[in-house]
Image (spheres, rainbow, N blue to C red):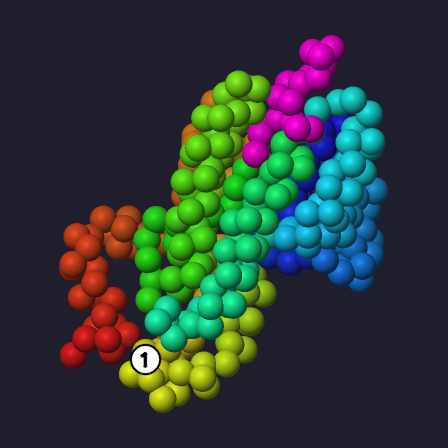
Amino acid sequence: MKSVVVTGVSTGIGWGVTKVLISQGVRVFGSVRKPADAERLSQEFGPSFVPLIFDVTDERAVGQAAEQVRQALGGEPLFGLVNNAGIAVAGPLLKLPIADFRQQMEVNLTGVVIVSQAFAPLLSVGPDGKGQPGRIVNISSVGGRSSTPFMAPYNASKFALEGLSGALRRELLLFGVDVIVVAPGAVKTAIWGKAQEVDIGPYRDTPYFPALEKVRGFMNGAGGLEPETLGKVVAKALTTAKPKTRYTVAPNPVQHFILSHLPPRMADRAIGRRLGLLP
């Protein structure tokens, strides 16, 4: 049975990836931070789901989980590693607490490095030559190549993940392990509910407050992709014979194409007027 490690599977994209992979006969080792989530998902997905309890920023816990997976593989290579776990920190960059910015980078970027260092060795074929090398799929975002006001920390983490993924892909040519980026647009996940709960009160006395209220109003997930849609794209990236290096999956491909290809100054004006940052 093929085995894949997926981080951050309690909800959203990670849950969708897990559901699709298991339906295709794959055993999923899925990371969660809470034992209650591990129990819930084990009941939902059955014996093909093996929970791993760790925070991606905890090197020791990640290392212990990697050893658990190594023993379960019994000498077979890991088929795939999906780096999905992440958070989104929002706020005007010049007013944002530095601790919040550091936390964004620690989870979305350093966490990917920690997990990759621990699990990537399991993707390689051993000395006996059994199996095929596995693949790494890093979940980025359309925000990994385009920037949104008040999402600078998140954008920065995803821009950096794109560069990290490209460099790692070339480093792993030595072992035949591929690295593929999947970049979704808006997805129907719990992150939208969390966005509504973000306290923008600390910015009330700044010039940014009216625009922040508008941004929060837009962040409702309406029209977003179903998590299973992303799961199917990740499954394709893991299994197709000749995968692309990057898959963009936007809810409205035409709108995304137009916005991503506007001249930067024109895009500045369009976004600035919509948010009230320009008259």
Q: Where the C terminus falls, by quadrant?
A: bottom left
> Which residue range is magenta in the image?
121-136
As drawn, the residue found furthest toward the front would be 98
- Taking the spot 26% from the left edge, 55% from the top edge, the residue there is 259
Instruction: Check residue 137 for magenta coloring.
Output: no
In the figure, 208 relative to 40: above or below? below
Look at the numbered disc 1 and give the secondary structure of its residue: loop
Which residue is outermost to the bottom? 205
For this rendering, which residue is in front, 219 or 210?
210
Instruction: Report the side of 257 relative to 126 (left or right).
Output: left
Q: Which residue is painted at 57% across and 42% down in the image?
A: 113
Q: Give how far across and how far down residue 5 sits, in percent.
A: 68, 39
Residue ID at (42%, 75%): 216
Q: Quadrant of the N terminus?
A: top right
* Magenta stretch: helix, strand or loop mostly: loop
Tag 1: amino acid:
Tyr
Q: Is residue 13 above or below residue 164?
A: below
Please indicate, yes or no, whether residue 265 appears anywhere in the rendered image: yes
In the image, 19 versus 67, the foreground residue is 67
Q: Residue at x 36, y 89 (%)?
A: 205
Judging by the rendered image, the residue that carries numbered circle 1 is 208
Percent across and percent down for residue 258 are: 24, 52
Residue found at the very far top of the displayed protein: 128
Q: Horizontal and vertical percent for residue 274?
A: 25, 72
Using the image, determine if residue 106 lies above or below residue 117. Answer: below
